[in-house]
Amino acid sequence: MINLDEIDRKLLAELQSEGRITNVELAQRVGLTAPPCLRRVRSLEEEGIIRGYHADLDASKLGFTITVFALVSLKSQAEEALRQFEEHMGSLPEVRECHMLNGEIDFILKIVSRDLQSFQEFLTSKLTPAPNVDSVKTSLTIRTAKNVPGVPLG
């Protein structure tokens, strides 16, 4: 873990909540002038603490009306089999998150789809026949009560 001071933490909190903030506004909010603020942000980017900046899109307004979580068990947990599965999931744009788990289930996936029929097609043509897949259990999201990206900084 990298040692961060209070100003670094404030910078990260501000950028995490509002990634499009100008450097001048960011500097004012954390009590710096613009040049040292920009140097600190660039340093945080170079250290890999800030990995990128993204727009928060409304999936349903873009036609992706369902979100599904899939619990995937693999036939083998050998490193090569895990790597092949992860690479395959990385190539599927519908898979928005892929997490390896400890325990009975090997992976949990977050999948978005336009509708139930599109998801069913994805499930049968891309997920179930994926390398090394033994079983897939899916749950359709009814509603999302909380969806906060990032980490709790403040």
Image (spheres, rainbow, N blue to C red):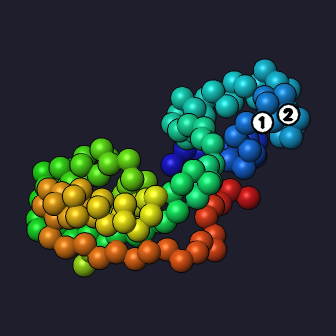
x, y percentage for residue 38?
72, 25
In this rendering, is residue 11 above or below 115? above
Q: Which residue is mark 1?
A: 21
> In the drawing, does residue 152 fall left or right of residue 11?
left
Q: Identify the disc placed on residue 103.
A: none
In front of the other: 41 or 98: 98
Vertical position of residue 82 compared to residue 138: above or below: above
Residue at image x 29%, y 61%? 121
Q: Which residue is mark 2?
A: 25
Q: Position of residue 130 (x, y in %)?
A: 18, 57
- The residue under label 2 is which amino acid type? Glu
Q: Nearer the viewer, residue 43 or 88?
A: 88
Q: Residues within 10 Å of mark 2 (few under 14, many from 20)?
A: few
Q: Is residue 45 above or below residue 94?
A: above
- Do callouts 2 and 1 mark residues in contact (Cβ within 8 Å)? yes
- Classify residue 46 as left or right of residue 103: right
Q: Quadrant of the C terminus?
A: bottom right
**Is residue 103 depicted above or below 125 in this figure?**
below
Q: Looking at the picture, how far across and down is residue 89, in whole percent?
A: 29, 52
Residue 52 shown left or right of residue 70 in the figure: right
Q: Residue at x 39, y 53 (%)?
A: 94
- Picture coordinates of residue 91, whole percent (x, y): 30, 44
Q: Secondary structure under badge 2?
A: helix
**Dot 1 amino acid type:** Ile
Does 40 sit left or right of 35 as displayed? left
Query: Is residue 33 in view from this perspective?
Result: yes
Is residue 112 visible to us here? no
**Element type at marker 1?**
loop
- Give the crowd class for mark 1: few <14, some 14-19, many >=20 residues within 10 Å: few
